[in-house]
Amino acid sequence: MNDIINEILKLKKEKNAVILAHNYQIGEIQDIADFVGDSLGLSQQAAKTGAEIIAFCGVHFMAETASIISPNKKVLLPDLEAGCSLAATINADQLREWKQKFPDAVVVSYVNTTAEVKAESDYCVTSSNAVKVVEAIPPGKKILFLPDKFLGQYVSAITGREIEIWNGACHVHEKIGDIDFGEAEKVHSQAEFLIHPECGCSTSCMLKSQMYHDCRNVHIYSTEGMIGYVEKSDAKEFVIATEVGILHRMKKIKPSAEFFPISDKSVCEYMKMITVEKLYESLLYDRYEIKVPDEVARRARLPIERMLSIV
Ligand code: SF4
C-alpha cells in the first residue's frame, strides 16, 4: 500500500494536481487527500488552489460541480460508475416539464443534482443553507424544491412555506429503513446525537429529529459544523446519523471518544467505488475527465452564485 501511495503523491506533484475526498470516502482515500469535506466546500477550496488538475474522490455530480466552479482546471473522477441515486431521480427534461406546470415558480435545487439540472434552476442549496435561501425568496412566490423530498419537507416545516416537492430520495435511506431515535437513545443514553443532512440518506433523520429538538442532545450540523462540534464537545460518546465514512475523520480528530453510526447500513456504495488503485490510475492516465460544456456551466453557475450571495 505504501508504494502506491508514494506513487500517487509523486504523480500529484508532477502533474500539479489537488486531491479532494468527500467525507464519505474510504479512510485510505481521506488520508491521502489534500482536502476532505462536503461537495461544494471541496469545489470551492480547489478553485482557490493553483492546481491544474482536480482529482475528485466522490461521485459524478460533485466532479461536475468542480468543473462548473473551476472551468479552466481538468477535473478527474477515478470511477465513472460512481453516481448518485438521488441526483438520478430528476433530469433536465423532467425539470423543464415540471416548470411548465408552474411557470412563475422559483426552482430551488439541492446540490445533489446534475449540471444540466442546476442550469435549469434559480437557486442551488446545501442542506445547511436551504432554510436560509428559501426564507430569502419573497413570500408570495411559488417554490419548486428538488430532488430530495425529505429535505424539502424539512425546509417546508421550518419555514412554514408551502412548497412543491419532487419525490426524490437516496437509496441509502431505503436501505436503512425507518430509524428509531428512541431506541438509539436507550442504548446510548449519554451520547450526543449529531445529524449531518448533507446527503439524502440522512435528511429523513433530519426531518424526524425535529421531534427530539427540545428534549435531548440532538444537533443538526453541516459536515464542518459537525466536525467543529466534536472538537469542542466534552462528550465521550457520539451517535452519528449520516453515511458512515465521516466517522473516520471524527475518530482522527478525537481518538478519546467513541463514535457510533445510527445505522451501520448507512453506506453509499457509489462513494466506496473509489479506491487507492483507481485514484492512482486516474492520475497516471488523466482519467476520467468530467467536463461540463461551457454554456451549461455558465447557466449552472448562476444558481450557485445566487445561493452564495444569500448565505
Ligand atoms: S449517500 Fe445517497 S445522496 Fe449521498 S452520494 Fe450516495 S447516493 Fe447520493
Image: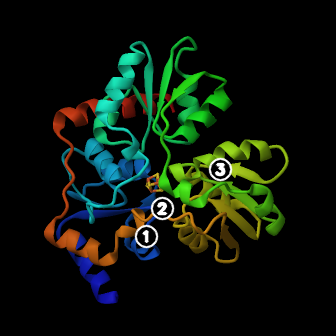
Rendered view: 129 above or below 84: above
Q: Position of residue 157 (x, y in %)?
A: 67, 31
Question: What secondary structure is marked by label 2?
Answer: loop
Q: Answer with left or right where residue 174 lies relative to residue 74.
A: right
Q: Give how far across and how far down residue 88 sits, in percent.
A: 37, 46
Relative to residue 143, is residue 127 depicted above or below? below
Q: Residue at x 64, y 72 (%)?
A: 254
- Residue 34 location, x and y as percent? 37, 65
Q: CA distance from mark 1 to mark 3?
A: 25 Å
Q: Nearer the viewer, mark 1 or mark 3?
A: 3
Which residue is the site of mark 3? 205
**Mark sitting earlier along the chain (1/3):** 1
Give the number of callouts. Answer: 3
Q: Amino acid at mark 2?
A: Asn
Residue at x 73%, y 57% (from the top left corner)? 180
Q: Position of residue 215 (x, y in %)?
A: 85, 48
Is 218 placed left or right of 246 in the picture?
A: right
Q: Secondary structure at mark 3?
A: helix
Vertical order, 115 against 33 (above or below): above
Describe residue 125's horizontal placement relative to residue 207 as left or right: left
Q: How far is disc 1 from disc 2 in space, using C-alphas?
A: 7 Å
In whole angstroms, how far apart are the C-alphas of marks 2 and 3? Answer: 18 Å
Task: Provide the residue designation for mark 1.
Answer: 30
Mark 2, residues whose alpha carbon is within 10 Å: few (<14), some, or many (≥20)? many
Residue at the far left in the pictured view: 285
Q: Which mark is residue 23?
A: 2
Return the residue nearer the eye: 42 or 152: 152
